[in-house]
Image: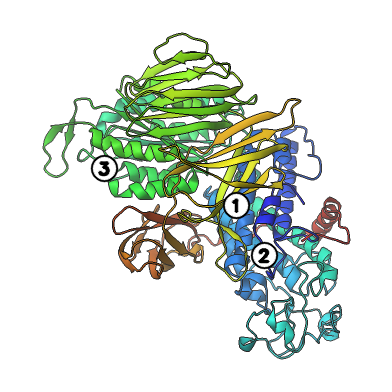
């Protein structure tokens, strides 16, 4: 089994899924099929680019891994984002079995060939449209979803039994014939001879090359299997007990037609590669790699959200200066940002969004910003931030510049939900007021700009603390100095060693481990009159008042923000904070070793398994995390701890190694207060093992509320789009406040309140309507929130939808040039060589 997804195969326990199996073992599964095709296709794309650029390309050693492929693509800094993209795609693939178990169209069951092909081709159009608009996350999610039925076709139909040695290319084309499909009244199977189902498909079906697939059901009394039709087969398929008995699936070696599993799995790999090639041809090589999380420089994005009202002229100039410096110094290097995002805001508007991979386009957008007279004192800062959060890649860092209070304070919980969901750090650069004239929109009376009060700034501090960012409060003349944090944060391979906040402030001790791989060790502190003692691994100490010493090589203070450059010493450090004023402390460095994680929940569907949470985990009950280490193939995880973000409480998880740097972590009880995720581990590659510590900068929350929603992820302009959802509470019942917002500001309706009783579920529906002029590929992020009657508990779900406008751009979304059968015959040979099959096979 390949290293990248071994843990997922072990985690997503499945008992009787009617598709290529999820468990690892003796047969190939959806995860391995998908990953294999992604890795092989990515290698071919990088090889083609190298040849076009006249550079050498060295194939990575077998078996391919995300780390090896990223290095071969001359993008080693993209290992984490590449692996993250693979996991995102494969989890969406697996989710089809968990959430659409009985929808025959998603599995090509019950001869649903036209319906299954429609799912693939409509989804493929959405993938291409999203890529064209550089909405790569939406493209990945839809790609994973459509790969599942594509792969199931080869296991569930009789395509292999008909003697086909190449994939059915017409499954990814909407204007061609899939084949000669059996009529509803035509018999296709006879009963198996005991356990021998090798010859249960009727001879005339084989001779006339008629397509059929098996029926599937778990309740025999409501079976809709017509007379004479094949069944899927397997222990939970009750239709297989009805004449004709048995089945034809090839999901694994002990399936009804398991003797053909290897052929079906190889064709599924070839078909997946064919679809990926189709996506690549439509997008181009570079955009395809970006969809896969691979870029030449850093995987990090540079994201600015900027107030453009009159008093911000100096701030905008500071942003221009730091942007120019970053672009001039990092373009063409491994620290070059992979993406640039700009969102201006003021009052009464915000946007438009600039999202580009071209640094010149980004610089021109910033140069075109002008500070203009706004409305009243407050600005739409959180609206601008919401737009940036729904557009930025996972694990991004955003910088928001303002000198005004938020007019849209009601978006605070929505913004925090998006921060948790995308694990994005948000830094606020808050400048004081200067005396200027602003016009009050309501009465056109001139007044002086009063700036941000302490209570106004607290909202920004709360959001920054939730994200693990800084709320830096400086004068406008100090801002250019404070922007040094942006230059530091734009560096690649940044890791967090410690993140903590105390509000109200109190004396507390914090420890962090510095390992041999960490460079550019830096401490950020925010707060007024903060005092501390820093103690190094050898016992040497240095006070905050000491201008020189053995531990701090450089210290800089501006406003409420203090930066410390540390003299690197490997081992355990301690920071003793003595301040009673509110403060935050963050320790960062650069290292290839980092981690990814997701919260998991037991599947609510008919099959046992784990699904990745799109919401907050449930409070007070046991929980699970999927943790993957990146940057080393020999690193192991020793501890995972959920630590109270504002206290000393902690809950240790039970770590189960799954191999290849992947781990299942189970905790007895999810914290009922805000917490961060701390991991500790060891890398055994060096002569002396490296002990490391990493922490999530983001603060997470659990909830007594459960909110679920699932719907078609393609939105057609001009057509009402309904999103049913349900809310359950294990806490006190009553009237719960419901909020729904979307990043495109499409017209929407929803119930503003729902009455819930403890332990019961109440349903609601959000209805969206996109204008007819909406561009295909537009990414819609819908956030649905539920808030308890006392306001003490909230939960959310964030859903992404792709817009496909069939009126405005059908030609642009058509399938790309057909790939010849000869190419895929060769590809099949190559894939067979890459996946040496024993009689045990692959699941």
Image quarter of residue 318: top left
- Residue 659 placed where, x, y %? 72, 46
Helix, strand or loop under label 3: loop
Residue at which label 2 appears: 14
Side of 737 where 85 appears, left or right? right
Helix, strand or loop under label 2: loop
Viewer-proximal residue, 497 or 67?
497
> CA–CA distance between discs 2 and 1?
19 Å
Helix, strand or loop under label 1: helix
Q: Nearer the viewer, mark 2 or mark 1?
A: 2
Viewer-proximal residue, 559 or 582?
582
Viewer-proximal residue, 331 or 568?
568
- Residue 14 placed where, x, y %? 67, 64
Mark nearer the N terminus (1 vs 3): 1
The answer to whether residue 437 is visible is: yes
- Residue 333 placed where, x, y %? 61, 27
Residue 543 marker: none
- Mark 1 in CB contact with mark 3 (< 8 angstroms): no
Residue at which label 1 appears: 88
Residue at which label 3 appears: 347
- Mark 2 in CB contact with mark 1 (< 8 angstroms): no
Image quarter of residue 536: top right
Viewer-proximal residue, 377 or 6?
6
Q: Residue at x 29, y 40 (%)?
A: 346
Image quarter of residue 719: bottom left
């Amino acid at each position: 089994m390949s290293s990248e997804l071994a843990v997922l195969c072990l985690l997503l326990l499945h008992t009787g899924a009617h598709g290529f199996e999820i468990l690892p073992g003796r047969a190939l599964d959806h995860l391995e099929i998908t990953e294999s095709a992604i890795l092989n296709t990515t290698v071919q794309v990088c090889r083609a680019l190298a040849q076009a650029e006249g550079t050498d390309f060295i194939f990575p050693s077998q078996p391919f891994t995300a780390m090896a492929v990223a290095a071969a693509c001359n993008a080693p800094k993209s290992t984490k984002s590449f692996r993250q993209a693979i996991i995102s795609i494969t989890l969406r693939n697996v989710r089809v079995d968990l959430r659409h178990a009985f929808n025959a169209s998603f599995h090509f069951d019950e001869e649903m060939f036209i319906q299954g092909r429609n799912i693939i081709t409509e989804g493929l159009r959405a993938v291409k449209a999203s890529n064209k608009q550089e909405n790569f996350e939406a493209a990945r999610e839809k790609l994973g979803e459509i790969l599942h039925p594509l792969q199931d076709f080869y296991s569930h139909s009789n395509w292999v039994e008909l003697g086909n040695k190449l994939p059915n290319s017409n499954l990814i084309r909407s204007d061609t014939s899939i084949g000669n499909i059996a009529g509803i009244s035509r018999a296709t199977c006879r009963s198996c001879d005991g356990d021998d189902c090798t010859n249960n498909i009727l001879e005339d079906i084989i001779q006339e090359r008629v397509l059929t697939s098996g029926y599937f059901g778990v309740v025999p009394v409501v079976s809709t299997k017509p007379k004479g039709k094949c069944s899927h087969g397997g222990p939970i398929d009750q239709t297989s007990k009805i004449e004709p008995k048995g089945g034809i699936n090839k999901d694994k070696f002990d399936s009804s037609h398991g003797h053909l599993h290897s052929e079906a799995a190889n064709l599924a790999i070839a078909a997946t590669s064919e679809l990926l090639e189709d996506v690549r041809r439509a997008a181009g090589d570079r955009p395809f790699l970006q969809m896969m999380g691979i870029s030449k420089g850093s995987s990090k994005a540079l994201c600015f959200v900027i107030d453009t009202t009159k008093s911000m002229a100096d701030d905008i100039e500071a942003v221009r200066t730091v942007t120019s410096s970053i672009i001039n110094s990092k373009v063409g290097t491994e620290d070059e940002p992979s993406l640039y995002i700009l969102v201006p805001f003021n009052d009464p508007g915000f946007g438009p969004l600039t999202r580009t991979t071209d640094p010149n386009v980004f610089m021109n957008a910033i140069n075109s910003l002008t500070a203009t007279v706004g409305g009243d004192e407050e600005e739409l800062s959180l609206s601008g931030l919401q737009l940036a959060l729904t557009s930025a890649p996972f694990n991004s860092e955003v910088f928001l510049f303002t000198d005004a209070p938020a007019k849209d304070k009601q978006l605070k919980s929505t913004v925090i939900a998006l921060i948790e969901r995308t694990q994005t750090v948000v830094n606020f650069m808050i400048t004081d007021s200067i005396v200027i004239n602003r016009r009050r929109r309501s009465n056109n009376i001139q007044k002086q700009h009063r700036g941000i009060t302490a209570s106004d700034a607290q909202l920004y501090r709360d959001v920054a603390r939730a994200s693990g960012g800084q709320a830096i409060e400086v004068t406008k003349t100090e801002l250019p100095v404070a922007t040094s944090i942006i230059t530091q944060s734009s560096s690649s391979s940044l890791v967090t060693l410690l993140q903590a906040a105390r509000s109200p402030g109190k004396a507390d001790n914090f420890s962090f481990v510095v390992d041999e791989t960490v460079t550019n060790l830096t401490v950020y502190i925010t707060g007024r009159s903060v005092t501390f003692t820093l103690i190094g691994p050898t016992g040497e100490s240095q006070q905050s008042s000491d201008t020189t010493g053995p531990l701090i090589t450089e210290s800089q203070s501006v406003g409420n923000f203090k930066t410390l450059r540390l003299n690197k010493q490997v081992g355990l450090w301690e920071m003793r904070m003595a301040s009673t004023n509110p403060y935050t402390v963050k320790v960062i460095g650069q290292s290839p070793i980092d981690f990814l994680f997701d919260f998991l929940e037991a599947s609510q569907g008919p099959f046992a398994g784990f699904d990745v949470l799109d919401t907050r985990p449930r409070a007070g009950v046991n929980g699970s995390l999927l943790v993957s280490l990146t940057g080393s193939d020999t690193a192991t995880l020793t501890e995972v701890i959920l630590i109270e973000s504002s206290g000393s409480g902690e809950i240790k998880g039970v770590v189960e190694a799954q191999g290849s740097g992947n781990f299942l972590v189970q905790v007895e009880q999810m914290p009922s207060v805000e917490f961060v995720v701390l991991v500790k581990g060891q890398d055994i590659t060096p002569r002396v093992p490296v002990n490391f510590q990493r922490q999530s900068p983001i603060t997470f929350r659990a909830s007594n509320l459960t909110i679920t929603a699932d719907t078609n992820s393609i939105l057609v302009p001009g057509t009402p789009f309904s999103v049913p959802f349900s809310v359950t509470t294990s806490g006190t019942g009553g009237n719960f406040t419901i909020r729904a917002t979307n990043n495109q500001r499409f017209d929407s309706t929803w119930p503003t309140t729902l009455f819930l009783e403890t332990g019961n579920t109440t349903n609601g529906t959000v209805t969206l309507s996109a204008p007819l002029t909406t561009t295909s590929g537009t990414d819609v992020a819908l956030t649905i929130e539920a808030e308890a009657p006392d306001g003490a508990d909230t939960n959310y779900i964030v859903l992404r939808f792709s817009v496909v406008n069939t009126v405005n751009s059908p030609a642009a979304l058509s399938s790309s040039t057909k790939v010849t059968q000869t190419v895929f015959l060769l590809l099949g040979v190559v894939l067979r060589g890459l996946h040496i099959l024993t009689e045990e096979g692959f699941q």
